[in-house]
Every structure is written in C-alpha cells, then in structure tokens.
Amino acid sequence: MIATASSVHSRKSRAVQDYTDGAGALDMHRVRQAFPIFKEKVYGKPLIYLDSAATSQKPLNVIDAMSRFFLMENANVHRGVHYLSERATEAYEGARSKVQRFLNAGDSHEIVFVRGTTEAINLVAQTYGRAHLRSGDEVLITAMEHHSNIVPWQMLCEQTGASLRVAPMDDAGCLILDEMEKRIGPRTKLVAVTHVSNALGTINPIRRIIDMAHAYNARVLVDGAQAAPHLNIDVRALDCDFYAISGHKMYGPTGIGVLYGKSELLNAMPPYQGGGDMIVSVSFEKSSYAVPPHKFEAGTPNMVGAVGLAAAIDFLSDVGGEALSEHESDVLTYGIRALSRMPMVRLIGAAPERVGVISFVLEDVHPHDIGTILDREGIAIRTGHHCAQPLMKHFGLPATARVSLACYNTREDIDALVEGLTKVQAVFQ
Amino acid sequence: MKTGRGGAEIRKRAGARVGTDLKDLYQEVIIDHNRRPRNFRKMEDATRTADGFNPLCGDQISIYVKLSDNVIEDVAFHGVGCAISKASASLLTTALQGKSREEATALFKQVRAMLTDGPAGSVMPESMGKLAVLSGVWEFPMRIKCATLAWHTLMGALEATGERVTTEEET
C-alpha cells in the first residue's frame, strides 16, 4: 500500500455544534431540533418520549453520517486496495479510535466492535470465561442486573461447573457493599456488575467494587449500557478489566456496541466466532488467528453501525459534559418531586446517586394499564419487568412503570406525565 | 402466533378512533371486574388447573376448574395482572359456570376470533353477551394477549397437559 486513503483524502475535521445558551446551560430548543422524531405526532399529539433507557432517539448527525456512508463510502473493510474500501476502512477504524477516546482506553486494539452489550457479555463469558473457569470457581453478579448480565453467566456456570453468587441490594435500590465484599474471595474469578441500574437508575460505586475484586485477583466486567449516555467513562481510572456498551442507548444505532478489554486479557483469550477477518492464515491443517480486536470480529462487521456510533459520540461530546448532566439532574429532581406529590404514586428505589430513571407503581392500577393510557396522550414510558425479574422480585412486584430521561427531555415533559397520570386515575376511579 | 400487524394497520386503527378508543378499552364493566373480580380465589377441590404466564408484562393467572361429567361445575381464578387480563378472567368465570366442555371450547374460539379479527371477523360482539365488552381490545394490538391469557389458560386446564401456558407460544 503506497498511500492510505486518509493521507490522500483526509476527512475534514467536523464542525462542533454548540448546544448551550449564552449562560452555559443547554439550549433546549436547539437540542430538541437535533432530533427529527420530535416533529412526529402520536395519535395527533406531540411525542413525549420517556423511554430512553430502552433506546434513545437519534440525532440528525447520526442519521446523516450513516446515510452518507451508504451514499458515498460503502465498500467492505480490510480487504480491497480500491479507493472505496480504503474510505470504508478509514471510517470503521476511525470509529474505533473515537470509541477509544470516549472510554479513555489506552489503545484502540482494546476496542472490540460487537452487536451490543449483550453480545459483549456473552463474548467474555464464552471466551475468557470458558478458558479460565473451573468447577469450584465462582462468578459474582448482583441483585440488580439486567437479564443480559445474568443469563450468560448461568450458561457459563453450567458449562464449567462454576457457581453463580449474587450480591444483595437494599430497599433503596443500592448494592450492600459489605455483603458484596463478603461474597468475594479466592474462589471468585469474575465479578459482573452494572454501572447503572436500568430499572432504577442507581449509579453503583464501581471503582470500589473493582478494588474489592482485584484484591482477590478476580476480573471485573462492567455493564455500561445505561452509564454511557449519562456519565463520563474512564476505563483506565476505573481499572476495570472489561467494559460493555450499546450504541443505541447512547444516541447511536442498534446493532453496534463495544467491548473494551485490557490488552493482556484480550491477547490471551481464545477467539469468539470463527470466520473471515479474524485470521492471519487458513489452511485445512490449522489456522492462525489475528490479533485483537480483529480476532473477535469474524465476518464483515457492522460498518455503518460503527460510523453511526462515532457520530453519536460526537453528539454526546457536543451536548455533553457539565451542561448535560446539570440539565438531566434538574429534570430528574423535578420529576421525583412531582411524582412524590401525587398520593397514589409509590416510587420504587431511592438511590442518592442516580441517573434519570424513575420507577413507580400506582395503587390499584397495573403498570400495563398506565402505559396504555399514557400512550394515547402521546407519552411513551416503559412498563413491565425491564428485563430484571430478580430485581422486581426483590421489591415484590410483577412490574413497574418506568420513566427514563435523556438530553431532550424537559420539565414540560414531566408536567405532561403528571397530567397523564391524573387521567389514568380518572379512568380507574 | 397472530402478531405481525403492520405499522400501517396500527396507524389506521389509531387514526380512525382517536379520542373514543380508550373508553372502548376501559369500559365500565371492565373497570368493575378489575376492581371486584368474580370467582377470584384458589379452589382447593379443583379437578383441573393450569397456570398462565405472559412473559412480556409479567401477568400470571391460575385457572381452577371443577369438571364433573364433562360439565364445568365451578371455575375460579387467581393471580396478578393488568385490568384487561383480570377483567377477562373474571368475565370468563362468570360465563362458563355450568357450561359443558364443548361449549367452553366453542366460546374460547369465539372470544379469540373477536379479539384478534375485530369487526372484520365472523364474531359479532352483540352475540357475545357480557363478553362483548372485550371487543374494544382489538384496537390495542399490544393488549390482545392480556385479554386472551385467561382463555388460553382455561384451555390448558381443560386439556390438562400439565404445562404452563404462555402467551408467547400462541399459534
């Protein structure tokens, strides 16, 4: 290769969008304008989207970046020497570097593209886990995990004879760290814990948990799906061994996610799936594998997904930081206060450190009915067990209603929710 | 499974009935049966029972039947669920007391057709007595399984396969 596409046609450095007003706060008009979906009406009413923990809406720059890729850059990566293949490779590997900076990883080789957090966890369970766990070893998870951070470990334990242990949480929805520490010992090989609870919004003291695990040489996987859209993530400061995120929860597309793993771990792990792109050479006698991250990326990857994810990181960096977290915590506090004032509402979880998630139930009205009635008001919330049935069991509930916030939500959205809940009450009176 | 309703159809349904449809769903009879469910108890001497589960929303219903000479002498239900699933189960128990097994099966088919086919189907709500209040559920595709849960569970009890009935295995 004489010259790479990047040296010949280097991409214009992108124009940074400013979403703040003169005083350093978010300009909500501008933020909401970045999301075309808010022009849509639901049953003739403006869309009030309070289900971002399920999936966030997508800003125009993400939609544009993905469409531009198909319009102008589409070809397969890492293969052809032709112009478009180099452009595509540059876009794909550029996205990897962007993710590396987003997570503050030390090396872009530590960034593995996967379908999402679920695949990232399964990858670690089936490669690292199967290579290192034996009968008598233990995997520790917590009572607030999403099913995607429970089931892969159950499968691994079945395959290896290791046992699964669970750290409890209290009624506020916080992990009981003393109890967690008691469950970590020389048998513990892996601790898998969520950074932020999808059902309650609780932010876990991840750094402390990682220290507790490392004291016994246990590896730690952090499920960062709910943290990525809200918190600054620094995998080196956390010293986590694995960190998993999903593009679609952080303003990016579905079908793309990231597994961060420390170099020395990824190097020593067996491959996940076999196929093209993950090999150095193949013969019928023996194939030799590529080095990470390609070792874990068999087959043609989700290139346009990676491009979309990179654009989502751009969006987050433009909108993000202080202004975003102040705005989200303002709407959260406003929401908690507004719902607390409604006599029939019972809030579930009361973690002092949390992102914009409010879980609640109404006396005598099932969450499903709340969801249907609010829906006809144009208000989208999640109702059900939130893929966290053990957590629901802890609270003795089959389901809750969940409001989850993102950058585009406002106090007015909360006002509409309160009005909607009043209608729910009226239907059931 | 009878899902796969296109977005266009959902929009058409919604567009046609804006404003009135919530009342179609939450009719007074449904609210009443939700608040005061009939035959809501565990039956100690049931001859047939089945548990129904909707994994999507966590609704769980147990149906108890006392079957004697192919006749439903008594039927009751217990469990947790939304207003639609509870009211549907409650209405089921009032509709089936004293009915034969064949009549129950026939009614199950009619209710299912009314819920899934809507006005275009062969079942006229007018012919369904009190069960007609369930016809409004047709306009809410996401809620049809709530209304059919008790009925599928009943069939499970009458067939007594002993397996838990789930709405995700509907065919």
Image: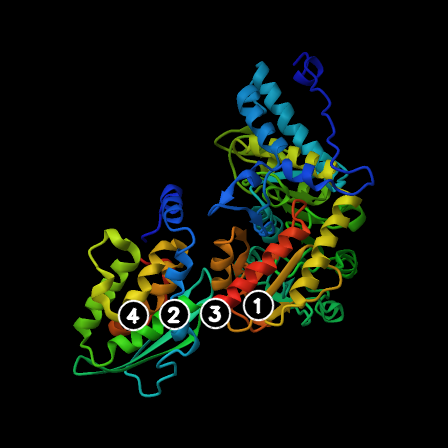
First along the sequence among labels 2 and 4: 2
Proximity of marks 2 and 4: CB atoms separated by less than 8 Å? no
> Are there few (<14), some (14-19), or many (20+) residues within 10 Å of tag 1?
many
Q: Residue furthest bottom?
A: B45
Query: In this rendering, does residue A203 appear at all?
Result: no
- Tell me where residue A113 appears, x and y as whole percent: 61, 38
- Residue A94 lies left or right of residue A88; in this view the side is right
Residue beneath disc 2: B28
Proximity of marks 4 and 1: CB atoms separated by less than 8 Å? no
Q: Amino acid at mark 2?
A: Glu
Color scheme of the displayed model: rainbow
Mark closer to the observer (4, 1): 1
Q: Amino acid at mark 4?
A: Gly
Using the image, tell me which numbered label, if any, was put on residue A361. Answer: 1
Q: Amino acid at mark 3?
A: Phe
- Dividing the picture into quadrants, the one containing residue A61 is top right
Label 1, secondary structure: give it. strand
Real-space Cα separation, disc 4 to disc 1, in angstroms: 31 Å
Q: Residue at x 68, y 39 (%)?
A: A29
Q: Compare residues A213 and B90 and report the one nearer the observer.
A: B90
Mark closer to the observer (3, 1): 3
Label 2, secondary structure: give it. helix
Using the image, tell me which numbered label, if any, was put on residue B156. Answer: 4
Mark closer to the observer (2, 4): 2
